[in-house]
Amino acid sequence: MAVIPLTLTISLALVLTFVVFFLREHERGRRAGAEHDSLLPLAEESSRTVAADEGAGDAAMPRS
């Protein structure tokens, strides 16, 4: 019957691992998550697009 203590040990290790990772993720807050990190390249691209659009608008306007 060495299987039962082995099963309990592995289960407790998995539970402790889950709790540690959950607490670490909870400390990071809502702004720093996987969803936020995955959208960071889009934020950089949209700022470049806005800057390029502003430059094109200035060139199209006649200067007096």
Image (tube, helix red, strand yellow):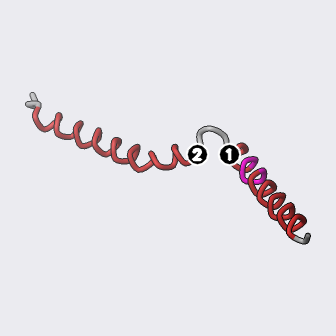
Chain part drawn in magenta? 19-23
Q: Residue at x 40, y 43 (%)?
A: 43
Q: Which residue lies furthest to the top in this view?
A: 64
When the figure is inspected, residue 61 is found, relative to residue 10, above or below; the finding is above
Location of mark 2 (residue): 33
Q: Which sits in the foreground, 17 or 12?
A: 12
Q: Is mark 2 on a helix, strand or loop?
A: loop
Asked if the stretch drawn in magenta spans residue 44, the answer is no
Distance (Cα) linking label 2 and label 1: 7 Å
Residue 30: give x, y in percent of width and height.
62, 38
Q: Which quadrant of the view contains residue 28?
A: top right
Residue 60: give x, y in percent of width and height.
10, 34
Q: Residue furthest front?
A: 1
> Amino acid under label 1?
Arg
When the figure is inspected, residue 20 is found, relative to residue 2, above or below; the finding is above
Q: Residue at x 79, y 54 (%)?
A: 15
Numbered badge on residue 10: none
- Whichever of labels 2 and 1 marks the residue nearer the N terminus, that label is 1
Q: Which sits in the foreground, 13 or 47?
A: 13
Location of mark 1 (residue): 28
Q: Do the residues labelled 2 and 1 touch (CB within 8 Å)?
A: yes
> Amino acid under label 2?
Gly
